Image (cartoon, rainbow, N blue to C red):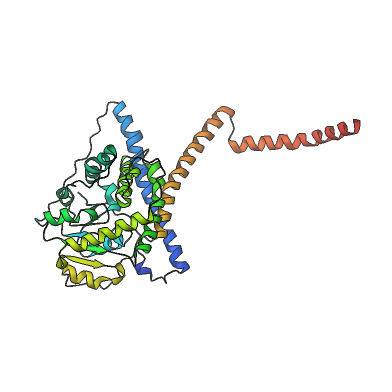
C-alpha cells in the first residue's frame, strides 16, 4: 500500500523570492491554482465513481468490490515524532522537512486520502460530538495511524492528543511549532478557515471524504473556539472568535510545555531551518538544501477558490454541451447556424420595419 498520494504542494524555498515581492505573489497564485485544480480533479474522480459508476454497476447487477488495502510492516517503535503546534504555524513545511529526514508524516491535508484513518476520526469522535451537541476529544486509534506506515504526524487534530501519544509511546518526541505572536497566528488561522468553509460545504454533497472534512471542520472550530454552536450552525459557519481562538492557542501551548518533558520537546519556528530540527531528532547528516516553505496564506486562498470554481466550470461545460446537442436535434441547426439565420432575417426586414415606422409617424 502506498502511504499517501503524491500531492501537489507549494515549496517556494528553492525559488529564493524576496518576501513580499510580486514574483512571490505570482508564484503563490500559480501553485494555489495548481494544487486547487489537482484537488478538484481528485475529488471529481471520486464523485464520478461514487455517484455514477458504482450505482450504475450495482443497478446492472455487477458486484463492486473495494480494493483491499494492505497495511505496511512497521517497527515496534510506532509513532516517533508528533507535531503539537496548531494549524498555520508552519506545519506543512515541517511535514515536508520530516519526510526529507526519513519520517513518513501524516498531515491533515492528507486525511482525505486515507479512508480508514479519516473514517476512524469521523465515526469515533467527530460525528458523535455533533450528535451529542458537545465537542469532545475522545481516544483516536493511534495504532491504526502507525499501521499505515506513518512514524510522524503533524497539525490538528493529532496535535491535541499529545498526552495520549506520550502515554502510549513514552519515547516519542514532540515539536511545538509557533508563530511570532498570537495575533500573527490568528490572522493566518482566520484566513484559512474562511477560505475552506464553502468548498467543503458544496464538495461534501458529492464526495464522502469531503463530507467528512465538512464534519471535521464543525468539530475543530468548536474545539478551537470552545463553542459548541459550531456543531450545528448552518453553513457558512460563523467566523472564528478572535479572543477565544487566541486563548485556546495559548492555553494549548502552555499545556504542552507543562506536560511534555523538556528533553522530548522542541519549541520551533520553521524559519530556524534545519539545524535545531536535526539536532533534536539526532540526525547526523543534516540537509544542505533550503528548508521547505509551503502553504502561504495567499496560496491557500487560491487553492480553496480554484478547487470550487474548476468543478463549476466543468459542470457548466457539460451542461452547455448537452444543451447544444438537444438544440441541434430539435432545430436541425447548430446554435451558430441558428443565430446567423436569425441575424440575417433581422437585417433583411430592418429596412422594411424602419420604412413602416416612418410612414406611420408621417400619417399621424
Q: Is residue 212 above or below residue 296?
A: above
Residue at image coords 27%, 58%? 251
Most distant residue in the right direction = 363
- x and y percent of residue 29 in the render? 44, 59
The spot of residue 218 in percent (x, y) is 33, 45
* Between 97 and 277, the one nearer to me in the picture: 277
Identified at 54% across, 29% down, the residue is: 329
- Count all numbered tags in the image, as a single digit: 0
Residue 35 in percent (x, y) is at 38, 54
Between 204 and 328, the one nearer to me in the picture = 204
Q: Is residue 92 above or below residue 114?
A: below
Q: What residue is at 41 percent from the left and 42 percent from the top?
A: 235
Q: Quadrant of the C terminus?
A: top right
- Which residue, as the protein is rendered here, is positioned at the far left? 76
Q: Is residue 31 visible?
A: no
Indicate left or right for 359 with 158 as reference. Answer: right
Report whether residue 125 is seen. Answer: yes
Image coordinates for residue 3, horizontal then vertical, percent: 22, 52
Which residue is painted at 43% across and 66% down in the image? Answer: 24
Amino acid at each position: 500500500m502506498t502511504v499517501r498520494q503524491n500531492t501537489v504542494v507549494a515549496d517556494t524555498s528553492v525559488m529564493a523570492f524576496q518576501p513580499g515581492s510580486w514574483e512571490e505573489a505570482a508564484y503563490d497564485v500559480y501553485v494555489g491554482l495548481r494544487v486547487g485544480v489537482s484537488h478538484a480533479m481528485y475529488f471529481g474522480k471520486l464523485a464520478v465513481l461514487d455517484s455514477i459508476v458504482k450505482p450504475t454497476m450495482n443497478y446492472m447487477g455487477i458486484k463492486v468490490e473495494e480494493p483491499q488495502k494492505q497495511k505496511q510492516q512497521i517497527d515496534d517503535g510506532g509513532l516517533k515524532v508528533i507535531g503539537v503546534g496548531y494549524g498555520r504555524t508552519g506545519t506543512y513545511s515541517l511535514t515536508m522537512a520530516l519526510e526529507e529526514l526519513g519520517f513518513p508524516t501524516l498531515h491533515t491535508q492528507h486525511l482525505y486520502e486515507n479512508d480508514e484513518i479519516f473514517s476512524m476520526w469521523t465515526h469515533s469522535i467527530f460525528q458523535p460530538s455533533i450528535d451529542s451537541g458537545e465537542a469532545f476529544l475522545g481516544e483516536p486509534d493511534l495504532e491504526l495511524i502507525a499501521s499505515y506506515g506513518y512514524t510522524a504526524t503533524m497539525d490538528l487534530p493529532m496535535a491535541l492528543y499529545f498526552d495520549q501519544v506520550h502515554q502510549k509511546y513514552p519515547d516519542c518526541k514532540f515539536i511545538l511549532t509557533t508563530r511570532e505572536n498570537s495575533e500573527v497566528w490568528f490572522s493566518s488561522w482566520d484566513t484559512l478557515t474562511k477560505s475552506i468553509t464553502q468548498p467543503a460545504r458544496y464538495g461534501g454533497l458529492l464526495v464522502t471524504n469531503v463530507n467528512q472534512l465538512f464534519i471535521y471542520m464543525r468539530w475543530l472550530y468548536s474545539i478551537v473556539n470552545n463553542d459548541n454552536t459550531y456543531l450545528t450552525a448552518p453553513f457558512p459557519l460563523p467566523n472564528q472568535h478572535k479572543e477565544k481562538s487566541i486563548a485556546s492557542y495559548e492555553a494549548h501551548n502552555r499545556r504542552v510545555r507543562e506536560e511534555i518533558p523538556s528533553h522530548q520537546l522542541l519549541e520551533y519556528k520553521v524559519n530556524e531551518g534545519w539545524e535545531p530540527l536535526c539536532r533534536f531528532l539526532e540526525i547526523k547528516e543534516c540537509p544542505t538544501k533550503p528548508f521547505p516553505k509551503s502553504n502561504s496564506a495567499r496560496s491557500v486562498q487560491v487553492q480553496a477558490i480554484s478547487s470550487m470554481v474548476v468543478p463549476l466550470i466543468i459542470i457548466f461545460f457539460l451542461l452547455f454541451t448537452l444543451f447544444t446537442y438537444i438544440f441541434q436535434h430539435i432545430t436541425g441547426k447548430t446554435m451558430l447556424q441558428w443565430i446567423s439565420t436569425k441575424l440575417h432575417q433581422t437585417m433583411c426586414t430592418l429596412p422594411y420595419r424602419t420604412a413602416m415606422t416612418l410612414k406611420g409617424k408621417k400619417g399621424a
